[in-house]
Image (spheres, coloured by chain):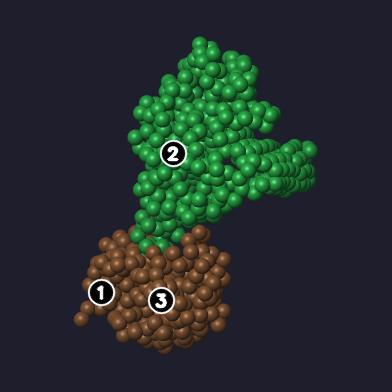
Chain colours: A brown, B green
């Protein structure tokens, strides 16, 4: 059976500068992968490329997502097909309420699959249920998207959206940055509750800390735009202890 | 080229006819207006404050002025219907410059409230009209003088002292007939001491309306403690031209909440001059314009703080797409006699295409140290990061752009105080952004 995600020889540039330089990665259903690496190694670029950020240009390679050519899809179709990116810096959208935002997202997905819009009562019930997963305050629903949210609330809001959209593959881009320990626990618990045999998660992080809560099956080290080392959870602990220099030395 | 000449020539040749079909009180203002126009020119793009809008060009075509006031009977049943959802308004039409009340309007007006034609008001209440008509309008302003020279009718609104009119007054401005025409409209609004009212005016054309020009002058008197919620809305077609002058005098403790809404237009220039003639006044002016294709909207607001301890707040927002042009000239004057003034003005614009243009000129003139004032202007594109964020959640790009444009206008829409109007406006703005013709007459929100 083919993998959920297969990245082969991926190259990508940002403003003419090559950041991803021949990256290979395979992710199977039910797996949790951690991607670690020093600053500037290309972690966030990778997540942006997979989500379809128009600021990044793919110059080579292929990405297959449950059999589809991911790179040929628009960001919205990638979402419909089950890709979700939890942003490192969630964007504030003044004037657009969380409820309208989520309703537009849910109904766009249903339309993509030829279904009718979700009835209002069903939608509100779903909102309520999914909010509980990350203990998100009811008041936030009537507020503008991320506007005036604390750092922790923004990240919980990302996981709430993930719970609403039920993706096949979630990419958590430095979800732990700017979180205190309580918020981290809530976010991680939300991610774990949403885990099934069918979906998969990529956790992009600097620190081992988050991996105490979201246990990875595989740990990859990204350096200079390539995966230079892959191991089990013990690799994260080793990195925490020894830093990245030894990896850099081996790779350079 | 001198567009003004055709109008002064017309007047000089038909002076008697103009007077014969108009009330005495209007005729009395004409000689001074005619004199002011001697040697004057309509502003064009070389005139300061008109860099983007040439009134010379706007008024050059000879559309014909109906000075003999010949007209067919206006059929209300075929007129554009314009109603607020779940709100009953006191409604009348202004067809060209002719006031046409809806059935039973007179009976529904509380005692002392006047909402009728200028001609009739001049005949019935000359003592009320005489000191106020023409007393705010500035004849040094060429379009105002032109209006004063030619105006033969219009509308009077008067709310007697102490009366709170609960139902909104609504005036629907339309053109009748199949020929191009110029409507010279004159409005006088008097809200007396401690009275309050809501007034909605809306300019409509149908897609089949021929190229028309409205030249309107509105004088608004807010006496001590008076309150007016005023929404001036335009929803017209591509070859329509509009030149509107609104003069407001606010006396002590009065409150004005005005919205200038250009939902769609051809070429529009709106001037609003508000004089703060007393202490403790409150003035909120919020405007919005949505322009696509090659349409053109220009708003000019002049606010003069002439007395101490008043507060004003202004916000104008534009969304311009395709080859549309927008302009905003805002000026706040705080005189030495107006300490403890608070005055804020902001202009925010979105250019949705690379070919749309915005010209913004905010100005502050402060002759006083004891004030709190600020102004600012910013023009930009839709937030690309927000757009991408929404798309990663599955919201299609077109829908996401629409939601962001709608969100951009949210604060102006929410500032509309007339019941039901904000809801309808929200709907009309959404339809407008969706590219559907925002025709109030087909408004499903009603």
Chain for disc number 2: B
Residue at position x 27%, y 77% from top? A4
Chain for disc number 3: A
Chain for disc number 1: A
The residue where tag 3 is placed is A126
Image height of A240 relative to B234, above or below: below
Q: Residue A43, can we see it?
A: no
Nearest to the observer: residue A106 or residue B391: A106
Residue at position x 53%, y 80% from top? A183
Nearest to the observer: residue B360 or residue A180: B360
Nearest to the observer: residue B387 or residue B142: B142
Residue at position x 42%, y 54% from top? B445
- Left or right: residue B420 versus residue A47 is right
Nearest to the observer: residue A206 or residue B35: B35
Quote the CA–CA distance across marks 1 and 2. Answer: 54 Å
Q: Residue B29, can we see it?
A: yes
Q: Nearer the viewer, mark 3 or mark 1?
A: 3
Residue at position x 58%, y 23% from top? B23
Residue A105's x, y, as percent?
Answer: 38, 66
Quote the CA–CA distance across marks 3 and 1. Answer: 27 Å
**What is the number of the mark on residue A66?**
1
- Left or right: residue A218 versus residue B301 is left
Q: Secondary structure at mark 2?
A: strand
């Amino acid at each position: 059976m083919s993998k959920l995600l297969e990245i082969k020889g991926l190259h990508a540039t940002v403003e003419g500068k090559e950041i991803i330089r021949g990256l290979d990665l395979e992710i199977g259903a039910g797996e949790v992968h951690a991607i670690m690496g020093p600053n500037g190694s290309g972690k966030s670029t990778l997540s942006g490329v997979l989500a379809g950020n128009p600021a990044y240009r793919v110059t080579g390679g292929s990405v297959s997502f449950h059999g589809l050519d991911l790179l040929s899809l628009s960001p919205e179709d990638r979402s419909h097909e089950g890709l979700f990116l939890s942003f490192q810096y969630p964007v504030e959208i003044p004037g657009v309420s969380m409820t309208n935002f989520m309703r537009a997202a849910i109904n766009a997905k249903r339309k993509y699959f030829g279904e009718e819009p979700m009835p209002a009562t069903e939608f509100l019930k779903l909102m309520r249920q999914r909010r509980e997963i990350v203990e998100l305050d009811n008041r936030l629903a009537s507020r503008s998207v991320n506007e005036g949210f604390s750092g922790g609330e923004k990240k919980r809001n990302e996981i709430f959206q993930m719970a609403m959209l039920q993706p096949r593959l979630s990419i958590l881009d430095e979800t732990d940055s700017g979180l205190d320990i309580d918020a981290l626990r809530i976010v991680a618990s939300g991610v774990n509750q949403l885990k099934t045999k069918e979906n998969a998660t990529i956790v992009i992080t600097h620190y081992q800390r988050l991996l105490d809560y979201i246990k990875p099956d595989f740990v990859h080290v990204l350096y200079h735009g390539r995966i230079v080392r892959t191991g089990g959870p013990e690799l994260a602990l080793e990195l925490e202890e020894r830093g990245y220099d030894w990896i850099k030395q081996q790779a350079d | 080229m001198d567009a003004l000449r055709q109008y002064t020539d017309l007047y000089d040749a038909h002076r008697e006819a103009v007077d014969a079909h108009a009330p005495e009180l209007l005729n009395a203002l004409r000689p001074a207006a005619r004199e002011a126009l001697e040697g004057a020119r309509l502003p064009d793009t070389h005139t300061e404050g008109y860099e983007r809008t040439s009134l010379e060009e706007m008024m050059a075509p000879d559309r014909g002025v109906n000075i003999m006031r010949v007209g067919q009977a206006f059929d209300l049943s075929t007129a554009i219907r314009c109603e607020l959802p779940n709100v009953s308004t006191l409604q009348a039409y202004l067809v060209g410059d002719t006031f046409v009340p809806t059935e039973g309007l007179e009976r529904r007006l509380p005692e002392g409230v006047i909402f009728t034609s200028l001609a009739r008001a001049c005949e019935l209440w000359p003592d009320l009209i005489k000191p106020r008509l023409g007393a705010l309008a500035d004849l040094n302003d060429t379009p105002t003088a032109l209006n004063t020279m030619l105006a033969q009718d219009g509308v009077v609104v008067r709310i007697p002292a102490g009366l709170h009119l609960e139902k909104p007054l609504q005036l629907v401005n339309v053109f009748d007939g199949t020929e191009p025409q110029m409507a010279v409209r004159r409005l006088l609004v008097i809200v007396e001491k401690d009275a309050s009212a809501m007034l909605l005016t809306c300019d409509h054309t149908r897609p089949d309306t021929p190229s028309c020009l409205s030249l309107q002058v509105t004088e608004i008197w807010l006496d001590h403690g008076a309150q007016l919620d005023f929404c001036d809305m335009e929803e017209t077609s591509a070859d329509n031209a509009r030149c509107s002058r609104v003069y407001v005098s606010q006396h002590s403790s009065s409150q004005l909440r005005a919205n200038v809404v250009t939902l769609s237009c051809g070429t529009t220039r709106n001037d609003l001059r508000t004089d703060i003639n007393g202490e403790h006044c409150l003035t909120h002016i919020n405007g919005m314009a949505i322009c696509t294709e090659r349409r053109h909207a220009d708003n000019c607001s002049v606010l003069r703080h002439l007395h101490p301890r008043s507060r004003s707040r202004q916000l104008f927002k534009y969304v311009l797409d395709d080859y549309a042009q927008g302009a905003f000239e805002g000026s706040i004057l705080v005189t030495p006699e107006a300490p403890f003034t608070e005055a804020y003005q902001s202009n925010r614009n979105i250019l949705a295409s690379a070919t749309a243009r915005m010209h913004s000129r905010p100005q502050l003139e402060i002759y006083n140290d004891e004030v709190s004032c600020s102004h600012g202007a910013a023009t930009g594109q839709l937030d690309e990061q927000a757009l991408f964020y929404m798309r990663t959640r599955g919201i299609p790009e077109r829908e996401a752009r629409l939601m962001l444009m709608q969100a951009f206008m949210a604060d102006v829409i929410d500032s509309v105080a007339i019941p039901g109007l904000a809801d309808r406006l929200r709907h009309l703005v959404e339809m407008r952004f969706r590219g559907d013709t925002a025709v109030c007459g087909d408004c499903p929100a009603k």
